[in-house]
Amino acid sequence: MKKYSNIRATLAIARASLKSILRSPSAVIFSLAFPLIFILVFGFIGGGAVTVDVGVAKTCDTVNPVYQELKKVSVVNLIHNQPADELNSNLSKGTIDALLDIRNNADKKFEREHPVFEVNVQYTKASSKGNILKSVLANILNGINQAFHQRILKQEAPPQITRLKETVISGREYKTIDFILPGQLGFSLLSTGVFGTAFVFLSLRITLVIKRFFATPVKRASIVIGEALARITFSLMGALFIIIIGHYAFGFTLVNGVVTVINMLILSTIGVIVFMGFGFVVSGIAKSESTVPPIANIITLPQFLLSGTFFSINAFPAWLQPISHALPLTYLNDALRKVAFEGAGLIDVSHQLLILGIWGLVIYTVAVKTFKWE
Amino acid sequence: MKKQSVITVKNLVKNYGDFAAVKDISFEVYEGEIFGLLGPNGAGKTTTLEIIETLRDKTSGEIWVDGFSVDTDADSIKQRIGVQLQAAGYYPNLNLSELIDLFSGLYGITKTPMEMLQKVALTDKAKAKYKQLSGGQKQRFSIATTLINNPRIIFLDEPTTGLDPQARRNLWDLIKEIRDAGTTVVITTHYMDEAEVLCDRVAFIDGGKVVGIDTPDNFIDKLVSSGFERPKQVKLANLEDVFINLTGKNWRDE
C-alpha cells in the first residue's frame, strides 16, 4: 500500500477551503468590498489639505498689502460672495472659520501719506481653525510693519530678541490614501481572520463535516493548516488587490515599489495568522452560528474604531490611548504604514512585530484551551 | 463452512460519566455479508458503530477490524473502512466532483470524480451542490464518498431514514451491489422490513446489550415455532406493495 501523504491531504483541504471562501458572498464582501468602498470614499473626498475659510465683508478694503499677502497664502480660502447676515450666521455655525474686514484709517493721527490699515478679524468658538489665520495674520502684519520701518521711515528695525529661521525640506506628500489604505487593509485582515475562521470551524463542527473527516486517515494538524493556508491565500489575494487599486487609482505611496509590496504581504500574513487565533477562540466559545457575530464583533469593533483604522491614534483623548496601544491591529496598521510610506524594512518594525507575536502567543494559548473539535 | 470474521467486538463497554451507553457487547461480522445492527433509539447502536469506526473512545473491551486493533492501529483501520455518518454534512459551497476530489486527497487515493459518481448513478449531478440533491441522492452521494478508498468494510448509519419507498428500494439495490462486489456492509436501521430484505445477519441491541444475533430467517422461524402468531391474519401483500404497485418501481428525483 502506498504511504499516506499528510501534505497531499493538507493541500486537498486548502484547495477545497479556498474554493469555498471564494464562492461565499460574505467573505468576499467583508474582505474586499468593504475596504474598497472606504478607500473609494476617502480617496475621493479626502484629497484636501487643511483650509481656513475666511469670510470677507463687503466693506473690506482689498487693495491693501495685508489683503494681497493673504491672497497668496494657500491655506486661506477667501470667500467674497456672501452678504453680511449670512456671513455672521455662518460664522456662528462654524461653516466659515473667521470674518475679515480691513479698513483704511489713513487720516487719523499718523503721517498722512502712509495709509494705516486696521485689520478687523472676528473668530468663532464654533471652529478652532481661526488660530491658523491668527498666526498667518501675525506673520503678515509683522513683515509689513518691519518693511515699513526699514524702507519708508529709513529707520533701523527695533532690535529683535527672537529670530525665526524657516526652511522647507522636500518630502513626500502624505496623502489621505497613505493613511486610509493600510488601515483598511489591516481591518480586512482582521475580519477575514476572525469572522472567516470562526464561522468555518463552527459550521464544520456543527454539520459534522469534521467528524466525517476524522473517519479518514487525515490528521487534525492537516485540517487546521489546510484551512489556514486557504485563508492566508485569500487574504493575500485581497491585500494585493487593495494595494494595486490604491496605488494605480489613488496614488497610494509604495516607496520601494515591489519590495514594499512584498513586505506588506509578509506583514499581512503575520497579521492574519494572529487574527485567526481569535477566530479559533470564537469558534470554540460560540454555541451556534448566530452567536458568532456578537462575539466576533466584540473583538473586531473596538479594533475597527480604536486601532487607527480611520483616525490617527494621536487624535484620541489621553485616557483612550492606552487601550489603543494594547490592541494588535494598532501595531499591524502602524507597521503597514511605516513600510508603505516610510519605506521601512521588516527589521525597522520589529517592535510592532514583537507585540503582534506576543498577542499571537497569548491568543493561541487560549485557542488551544477553548477550541472544540466536536 | 466457518466464515472469515472481519470485525470482532469483545466485551465492549462505553460509559458517559454515570451513564452506561454500551454494556458488554460482543459480536462478529463475517467477510462479505450485510450485517444489521437493530434496536430502538438510544440502544447504543450509533455509539457502538462510532467506536468501531475509531471516531469515539471506548471505556473497555477489545475490537479488531480487518485484523487491526482500534487501540493501536486506528490509522490502518481508517484506511480500510468507509464511513457514512447519520446526518453528516459536506464541505459548504463545493459541488459533488469537488467533494470527491477533496475526499480523494484526504484518503491519499487518486480517483476521478466521474468514476465514483458513476457507481451511484449521479454523474449528471457532478456540478450540483450537495444541498441541492434530493434525500435519496444525498444518501447515494454519501455512499460514494465511503467507497473512494476501496474499503474492505463500509458502515452505513440509518441510510434510508426519511426516504420514500422508491428511493429506499433503489438504495437497497445499491447496497446489495456493493456487497456483491466483495465489500462487507455494516448497517443500522429502524425498519425491520428493510433488515429482512437486506441483511444476511442481524444483531438486536437493547439497553446497551446484545439480545440476539442470527439470520433474519432463523429469528422469524424460531419465533413462529415458539407458537407466536400475529393477531391479524397476514395478507399476501402489504400497503407498501400497494404503494409501489400504484406509483411504479422506478426511483425518481424529488
Image: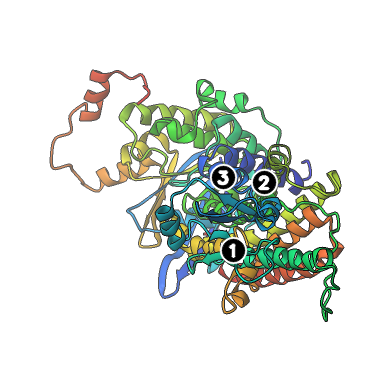
- Kind of residue indicated by mark 3: Val
Q: How many numbered discs sit on the rendered protein?
A: 3
Amino acid tagged 2: Ala
Q: Residues within 10 Å of mark 1 (few under 14, many from 20)?
A: some
Q: Are marks 1 and 3 on the same chain?
A: yes
Please indicate whether residue A362 sits to the left or right of residue B218 in the image: right
Given the image, what chain letter belongs to the residue carrying mark 2?
A: A
Q: Residue at x 59, y 38 (%)?
A: A22
Answer left or right for B111 relative to A213: right
Q: Which residue is mark 3?
A: A41
Figure check: A152 above or below A269:
below
- Give x and y (percent) for residue A259: 86, 48
Q: Depth check: B178 or A293 in front?
A: A293
Q: How is the image coloured?
A: rainbow
Q: Position of residue A191 (x, y in %)?
A: 58, 54
Q: Quadrant of residue B72?
A: bottom right
Q: Position of residue A64 (x, y in %)?
A: 66, 55
> Mark 2 — residue?
A230
Q: Tell me if mark 3 has few (under 14), some (14-19) or many (20+) residues whose alpha carbon lies within 10 angstroms of its own.
A: few
In the image, which disc is placed on residue A105? 1
Disc 1, disc 2: CB below 8 Å?
no
